[in-house]
Image (cartoon, coloured by chain):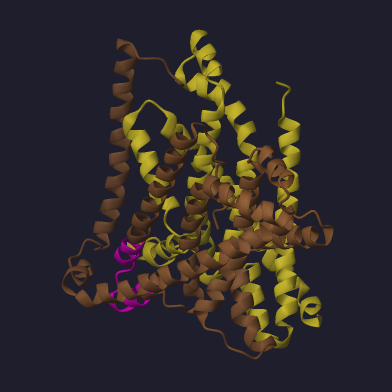
Amino acid sequence: MEAVVDNLDLLLEGFLRTLTLTALAATGALCLGTLVAAMRVSPLLPLRWAGTCYVESVRNTPLTVVFALAVFGLPKAGLGLTFFQFALLALTLYTGTFVAEAVRSGVNSVAPGQSEAARTLGMSFPQTLGLVILPQAFRNVIPPLASVFIALLKNSSIASAFGVAEATSRMGSLIEDNPSAVLWLLAAVALGYVVLALAASLLLSRLERSLAVAR
Amino acid sequence: MLYDVQGPRARRRTLVGSIVGSVLLALLALVVAKRLADQGQFDGDLYRAFVEEPQLWTRLGEGLRNTLTAAAYGLVLATVTGIVLAFGRLSTVAVVRIPAVAVIEFFRATPLLLLIFAFFLATPIVLGIRIQPLWALVLGLTLYNGAVIAEIIRAGILSLPRGQTEAALAVGLTRGQTLGSVLLPQAVRVMLPSLISQLVVLLKDTSLGFIICFEELLRVGGQLRQFLHNPIQMYVVIALIYIAINLLLGRLATYVEGRQRARLGQAVTVQPQPADLG
């Protein structure tokens, strides 16, 4: 118990890093995923094909392999980044595929009458997508996106194995220093993740309610 | 249906767009390829081992076998745990239901890596026994996926028509018998595609074993690349192995789903939750 209290500042610092990593990767994955989803529903065949290739290959690769490829592979391609940047890149690329799938199924869940009406009014494809379909799709997509981002929060713990001093990595080194407090440390860090996940899901369900429209 | 059947002008625009898109994608690929070529990543030496060293494939095969072993144990134990937890959560007795809910929610919200660490680091200190990395990995996978599978099974049971429960209770079955011999067999059938999708997640998650020195595919690859000095090529090969297996499993899930839809004449399958992406 003392080990947790005494090192609370270290653990909190770790969680701050976890949060930073998660927030940045979530932003990146949201942009990337939306772009890829738009590519996959567009009439442009090469873009659809490229989007499908990216989603199907990265989604079926374990995140740890994506991490290993980034951390050990990219320096060989002459790309030297910090461990944090590599972790951010790997998490963004991996989570982007799940965001793309969530947004795509959101787009497909918008009633066909909506796009038909937009087309009838003479809107172009980008207008139909940007002004009519995506605003509605994002509303439908918030619950699955919430799950994707909570998974991202948990997945960020893998960065601990690749040199990022986030919460799980801090826990690992604290356990080495205080082996007798192992259960307390594990419980404290698990509790931290549960609290963060709960906070995120509360926040997103409030957002969902505030964006909900009467239909 | 985001666009109509295209007329001549729209077709021309689509063609132009496709060409521009292809050119941009090709440029991107070219930049990447040039970068790799500049760093000598297309050097034959980096690929030779894959062709000339049968031992390399033997080692990778051993790694793959360990990966599949961990996934198989994990799948069986997680399914059993999932059924127990789902029954617990559906129980009418609060003393059973509330702990089951707490267990499911806790293990779903905890990173899997933390659970694996819990078994790997805590058991030697607390219980004084050193468990093999395989079992630390399998137990972690069991708890996390058990909680997820419990929710899948619960969703499957709740999706069944109420008449099934009512009829079973009316002919005098107990609640336990109703769950076990009437609802569960139907729910498992309905949830089979989701369960197969969860197997993909489980299989990918076995790669976390490399962190606790379990000799699975990724760890073997890591050892090999250290003296072949070809991390990009090695990890791409490993990724391709995972992609091939997971695409096959994905196909299987789609096939099973289609067959059920055809047999039942309606869409009864509940979509897998995107939360299950370990």
Chain that appears yellow:
A
Q: Nearer the viewer, residue B44 or B240?
A: B240
Question: Seen in the image, is B147 located left or right of residue A63?
Answer: right
Q: Kindly identify the residue that appears in the image at 33 percent across and 11 percent down.
A: B7
User: Which quarter of the figure is the N terminus of chain A placed in?
Assistant: bottom right
Is residue A143 positioned above or below A190 on the image? above
- Write the start and end of the magenta stretch as one range: B221-238
Kindly report the secondary structure that dominates the magenta region of the rendered protein. helix
Chain that appears brown:
B
Q: Nearer the viewer, residue B113 or A134?
A: B113
Q: Nearer the viewer, residue B141 or A125?
A: B141
Is residue B231 highlighted in magenta?
yes
Residue B56 is drawn in which quadrant?
Answer: bottom left
Is residue A1 positioned above or below B171 on the image? below
Is residue B173 visible to us here? yes
Is residue A156 visible to us here? no
How many numbered badges does the structure rendering display? 0
Q: Kindly identify the residue that appears in the image at 45 percent across and 36 percent down.
A: B263
Is residue A32 positioned above or below A181 on the image? above
Q: Kindly identify the residue that appears in the image at 45 percent across and 20 percent down.
A: A125
Residue B74 percent location from the top left of the image:
52, 67
Residue extending furthest toward the right: B94
Q: Kindly identify the residue that appears in the image at 28 percent across and 57 percent down.
A: B36
Residue B106 is drawn in which quadrant?
Answer: bottom right
Is residue B2 highlighted in magenta?
no
Residue A127 percent location from the top left of the image:
51, 19
